[in-house]
Image (cartoon, rainbow, N blue to C red):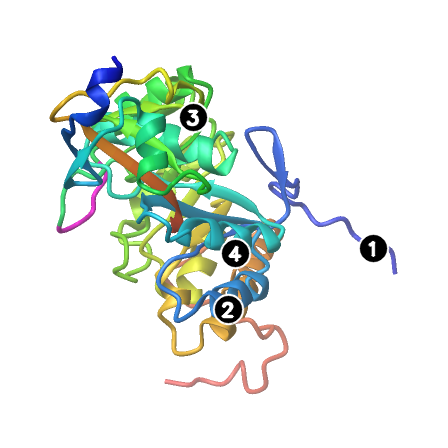
Amino acid sequence: MQSEVANSTGIHVNGEATATTAVSLADLLVELGFAETAVATALNGEFVARHARTATQLSPGDHVEIVAPRQGG
Amino acid sequence: MNAIEPITPSGATLKLYGVEVSSRLLLGTGQYPSPHVMASAVQAARAGIVTVSVRREAARANTGQRFFELIKSLGVRVMPNTAGSRTPREAIATAHMARELFGTDWIKLEVIGNDDTLQPDLFGLLEAATALRKDGFKVFPYTTEDLVAAERLVAAGCEVLMPWGAPIGTGRGLANRYALRSLRKYFTGVPLIIDAGIGAPSHAAEAMELGFDAVMLNTAVASAADPVRMAGAFAAAIDAGRTAYEAGLMEMRDMAAPSTPVAGTPFFDLDRS
């Protein structure tokens, strides 16, 4: 899979079109600067646990949600 | 004089999913003028549980972590919500993300069915509640006063229900008193928390007088001119309402009944016509 590193994949992150070279969800979080941040993730509407991010591969057109704690009622 | 033990319908401490809760006021953390005011309001309200949410995070912003650190410093229990979810699928995924972020299996489950009323979608709510209970969540469903829906939620494993007083953010108090009263009388053993629609301390006191176990509110405090003082006012109202319930309220009657003794009334034998 090394040859794929140069290719970018078109996905959506938090609703925004994003081009990424990340192969896995874990890679994507590093690429986007979330490595040091406590976030939770979902892929195409399904929750992806922290421990499953490395094994979760990204495909073109994927919708990724990256969320953090916020005020709420 | 010997002290007489008051007859208390339910003087026991409130337990939610087996956890003893010292305060009967649950406070939301949204809409405050500043994080400092929010923190002060939580303290003034003597809230034991605060609600929080999850939202999309911008890269390198770290907004969420700063907020969570502040909440943790307050020493209260955190209950994340699924606010904004419109389908069971969204609510379930949001609940899982919240559990991982906040480290709690408590979830205030909201599945919204109508944008104008923010009315719970009871069908979606039941579906999501059923799935989340199987996934080990302690589900607190935001529901309406509908008794049959409430029964189904309890059957699905919900040990606490959160019926609305009125639609979120309206401040209209208990919009359907009769149905809420019925719900309270029917579910004697299920903790019921009035959630949403509370606008004034008198509304909260009324909910407690009716025998509801707790009140959850946010906007009424957060959007007050002085949120911290308003938080204190709600704390006092909830204490008063609960104490009144435990003390046993008098029955309402249609005709007047004199409180001053009739016997010995001066001029009583005179013809007053």
Residue drawn at (24%, 43%), measured in percent from left and top? B84
Query: Which comes sooner in the sequence, label 4 or label 2?
Result: 2
Q: Residue at position x 39%, y 50% from top?
A: A70
At label 4, which amino acid type do we have?
Answer: Met
Question: In the rendered image, which residue does mark 2 sit on?
Answer: B36
Marks 2 and 3: in contact by CB < 8 Å? no
Marks 1 and 4 close (CB-CB < 8 Å): no
Q: CA distance from mark 4 to mark 3?
A: 56 Å
Q: Which residues are magenta?
A: B116-120
Q: Measure the alpha-carbon separation of dots 1 and 4.
A: 21 Å
Q: In what quadrant of the picture does the C terminus of chain B appear? A: bottom left
Identify the element where label 2 is drawn. Answer: helix
- Mark 2–mark 1 distance (CA, rounded to whole Å): 45 Å
Q: Nearer the viewer, mark 3 or mark 1?
A: 3
Mark 1 element type: loop
- The subunit carrying tag 4 is B
Tell me the residue that label 1 is attached to: B3
Q: Position of residue B269 (x, y in %)?
A: 53, 81
At horizontal 43% and vertical 36% (from top left) the residue drawn is: B185
A48 displayed left or right of B270: left
In the rendering, which numbered label is found on residue B250?
4
Looking at the image, residue B38 lies above or below residue B167: below
C-beta proximity under 8 Å, tags 4 and 2: no
The local crowd at label 2, few if under 14, some if 14 to 19, many if 20 or more residues have their Cα within 10 Å, is few
Look at the numbered discs 4 and 3 and tell me whether their residues touch, using CB distance below 8 Å: no
Name the residue nearer the viewer: B145 or A67. A67
Distance of mark 3 from mark 1, alpha carbons?
Answer: 59 Å
The CA distance from mark 4 to mark 2 is 42 Å
| Res. A50 mark | 3
Q: Residue at x 37, y 35 (%)?
A: A30
Please name which of the two marks, 2 or 1, marks the residue nearer to the observer: 2
Q: Residue furthest right?
A: B1
